[in-house]
Amino acid sequence: MILVTGAAGFVGYHLVNALAGQQKRVRCLVRNEPAKINICDKHIEVIQGDIRDKKVIDSAVKGARQVVHLAAVIQSPDPEVVCQVNVEGTRNLVESSRQYGVEQFVFFSTLNTVLPVKNRYSKSKEKAEDIVRKSGLNFTILRPSVIYGNGDDGTIARLVHAVKNRKIIYLLGNGKYKLQPVYIDDVIKAICETLNNLCQFKDRTLFLVGKEIVSYTGLVDVISEIIGVKKYKCYIPLSVIDIIIKVFSLFSKKGIQLEDKLKTYPHDKIIVDKLLQKDIFPLQVAPLKEGLSRYIAN
């Protein structure tokens, strides 16, 4: 039995469907009703509950041989929620995994933990990684870059939507900040390989990144080429955005949330350091244009 937390999320439902397709028994821990999970599939069991509830975690972990921990809060108007879910939720899961003899623990973190500036989310993931490393479990920590694919509602999904629907594409800053996007199918392959090869990936921390490094401006150009349009780009200085958000923060918690999110924006989210490159997951990944073409076609 494989327990997948955050099974109703973007990565989660892709993973659950892939594992069930391999005839593996999967137990899904979800907070809300899982609209995209085939609950009629005989290989899939669903438990609904909060990862902060130790009793729920105990019932979810009991009987599982492997755990894939995807559940996380990226941002919230209440900063405490990010810490409670990402740090204390991970602690609960680790304790239950030890208690019930889980053989393998796969933790989904973020590449942002190695950025020079961290926001609440990346700080919480850093703390959670530490809990996993000190757990005594057979663990693997995966640090993905920006992920794109069907069901995505993040950075690349918003850019694709903008290119399809707007005459002008607005980019924050100078548009030169670099990304190393990775396609969802490759992320799922990496998780499945990890589950199938405990000895190879035991006690390792690995980056999941794409083949190419691209700037935000370059990303808009690639998406525009695939769709067959030409778009004008307008660059908004970060100093202007910063002032707007600071004023907004005086009246709304969402302003504080946006301010925190933008902390990591003007930093390259790539792996170029030779010491870190040896920790890139050994996987043949789709070229960026190929992956984006598949995504946009669907």
Image (cartoon, rainbow, N blue to C red):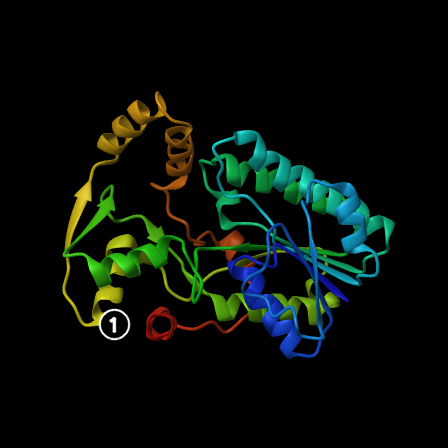
Q: Is residue 39 visible?
A: yes
Q: Residue at x 61, y 70 (%)?
A: 38
Q: Residue at x 48, y 66 (%)?
A: 184
What amino acid type is highlighted by mark number 1?
Answer: Ile
| Label 1, residues with CA under 10 Å away: few <14, some 14-19, many ≥20 | some
- The answer to whether residue 135 is above or below residue 60 is above
> Which residue does the numbered mark 1 point to in the structure image?
226
Q: Nearer the viewer, residue 70 or 52?
A: 52
Residue 228 left/right relative to 182: left
Q: Residue at x 48, y 39 (%)?
A: 75
Q: Position of residue 43 (x, y in %)?
A: 71, 73
- The answer to whether residue 21 is above or below residue 4 is below
Secondary structure beneath label 1: helix
Residue 206 left/right relative to 237: right
Q: Is residue 282 visible?
A: no
Task: Please identify the quadrant where the N terminus is shown.
Answer: bottom right
- The answer to whether residue 73 is above or below residue 142 is above
Residue 37 left/right relative to 258: right
Q: Residue at x 79, y 44 (%)?
A: 55
Q: Position of residue 63 (x, y in %)?
A: 84, 61
Task: Please identify the quadrant where the C terminus is shown.
Answer: bottom left
User: In which quadrant of the rendered view does residue 279 lie?
Assistant: bottom right
- The answer to whether residue 274 is above or below residue 85 is below
Q: Nearer the viewer, residue 128 or 46?
A: 46
User: In which quadrant of the rendered view does residue 166 lie?
Assistant: bottom left
Q: Nearer the viewer, residue 177 or 7?
A: 7
Image mark count: 1
Q: Position of residue 271 (x, y in %)?
A: 45, 54
Residue furthest toward the top?
A: 250
